[in-house]
Image (cartoon, helix red, strand yellow):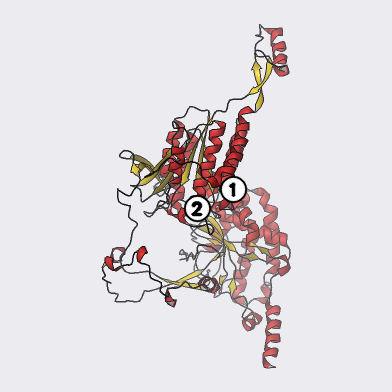
Amino acid sequence: MEEWVGSIWHKYIVQKSHTEFDHARVEFDDIKKSAGLVFRALGGAPTKRVEAAVPRDYYARRKLLDKISGANQQISLAWQDETSLRLPQSIAIFDTQQLNRELYLWLVALAAYSPTHFTHWARDNQAAVTAVLATFPTLRPRYARLAAATLKLRTPLASLPKSLQLLEHAVIQAILHPETPIDFPVANYAPQAIYLWLYPNENIKANPFNAADIDCEEEQTSSLMTPQESLQARKKSERVEEEDSKDSLMVFRLENLFSWSEFSRVNRAEDDTEDEDAQRVAEDLDIITVAKGSRQKTAKLKLDLDLPAAIEDDLPLGKGITLPEWDFRSNQLIPAHCLLQPMLPKDSQPLALPASLASAANKVRQQFQQLQSIKNWQKSQSTGDEIDLSAWLDFHIESKTSLARDTGLYLRFQSSQRDISTLLLADLSMSTDAYINNEHRVIDVIKDSMLLFSEALAAVGDPFAIYGFSSVKRHHVRFTLLKNFAEAYDDHIRGRILSLRPGFYTRMGAAIRQASRILAEQTQHRKLLLILTDGKPNDIDNYDGRYGIEDTRQAIIAARRLGLVPFCITIDQKADQYLPYIFGSNGFSVIVNPCQLPSKLPQLYHQLTHSSC
């Protein structure tokens, strides 16, 4: 009976204190893509992510009903730092979905003109609002609607204590007249949340108006992004000191380690198993506690990936090629920063096309052989099948005023010459060793794709080359030759492709620069650079993250300056987070099912080249 009464009371008191309009709620996932487009279109940083943020503590004056129910201790606020713009996971502040959606887009526009670090939170927000409305006058009606709806929800001045009335009056005037400088008085509590403004990127633990100038420190956030990246919102963090521990060095002989051939079937200890509930627990936490290690990195044991012995490695071709690399931190191209090593696959033997691909190869060859016989109307011909009426009209008009030549007045229906060369650059990093199903690895799918792609281009007669790449730091970028433009496609090329093995890391910028040099030397009018990958650029010497993305983007920009047409084909399902910035919105294609890559690759090539041939 007691529990039943308690549940009824809890439900009643929570409903009485609930102020949001659930029927008009707009989720962040519904506007995520449009918010990102608006943010960048209005001048926001192109590398800054647009993400959801969890509610955080807001120490404002609370009503008695809120204190009883425990509600409104945390509020969804919008804020940003150097890496991302954080918007509420959902907005149900207003009673219509239109206003809630407009609030999302308004916050995005405001973020494009707001500083990352505030000097005075309220005045900086006023300045940002003024800048947005001055730059985009069409947003004034939207801001007016949002401001009017916001003021209706605020607590009336008469209901507030006298100590907060002056501050609330200043806030109202700042919302109604953002272009007018306002003096904000000191108060013991923060004002009621202002959802039209961005907040500092730190946890608000005190009233932000307790000083004339507010210096906001950057919030230390913890990006708990698992391989699945299911966390939709960032967590707040709390930094603590690391406890002193006396860890001793574990000394052992490497000869005592089991090799793969000496495998022993033993039960794994429970502490060594992965905690399946760890992700769920992390999502439920409001605060993530982190500690900064005091030990130097050199004092820790580090295992690195070594290159195979020369007798077991692929065959190097020459001493290597030095290439530049883009450093976004200094905003410059560092000359001779990378060493690219051309290589041939080791122990490759001439091999026929695998029987498993015979049927698909015959179908692809038949489709592409038909492209050789496609005919088009050729204009400005001296003789032809029909009269070119447009040319005849021009000739007739010119002959009235001057001596006109009667050449090129016919249309001829004949086969057009395909004037295109293609270079396929494939990512051979260690991630291609992963299995996509019970039978095939990523590297197996890539090899099948290369073979069917080669069968298609050999059938149509387009010149093409195929290279693969992987890397181990900047001084060893492996550039594997599978077929150059001078070689004919035969069993030797098939043998090289079938002998491929997963490599190391993905230093994409250097490989693209070398591939661009090779492709730019071809004489064809149209030059297509196809890049086949399964993930984002990365390496173990600080090439991951923004550094690798920026370097790859600069390599693509340089390729376009050479007259090439770069296009990326990927099986990474999260590629839309970084490939639009590198290749542009129309410069890449994501293959949802990796097993379909062998059949999709020739189709994509046909789509990319059909309109130009």
Q: Position of residue 402 (x, y in %)?
A: 67, 7
**For residue 568, side relative to residue 407 (left or right):** left
Checking the image for residue 281, the label placed there is: none
In this rendering, is residue 25 above or below 530? below
Q: Could you tell me if residue 585 is visible in this image? A: no
Residue that mark 1 sits on: 41
Q: Total marks drawn? A: 2
Q: Which mark is residue 442?
A: 2
Which comes sooner in the sequence, label 1 or label 2? Answer: 1
Q: CA distance from mark 1 to mark 2?
A: 36 Å
155, 464: nearer the viewer = 464
Q: Is 367 rendered above or below residue 328?
A: above
Q: Residues within 10 Å of mark 1 (few under 14, many from 20)?
A: few
Residue type at mark 2 is Val
Residue at the top extreme of this rendering: 403
Q: Nearer the viewer, residue 381 or 48?
A: 381
Is the residue under label 2 in contact with that under label 1 (CB below 8 Å)? no
Q: What residue is rendered at 63% in x and 27% in y? A: 373
Residue at disc 1, secondary structure: helix
Residue shown at 47% from the left, 45% from the top: 426
User: Is 609 above or below relative to 69?
Assistant: above
**Figure quadrant of the N terminus:** bottom right
Q: Is residue 353 above or below residue 29?
A: above
Disc 1 residue type?
A: Ala
Residue 506 percent across, percent down from the top left = 43, 50
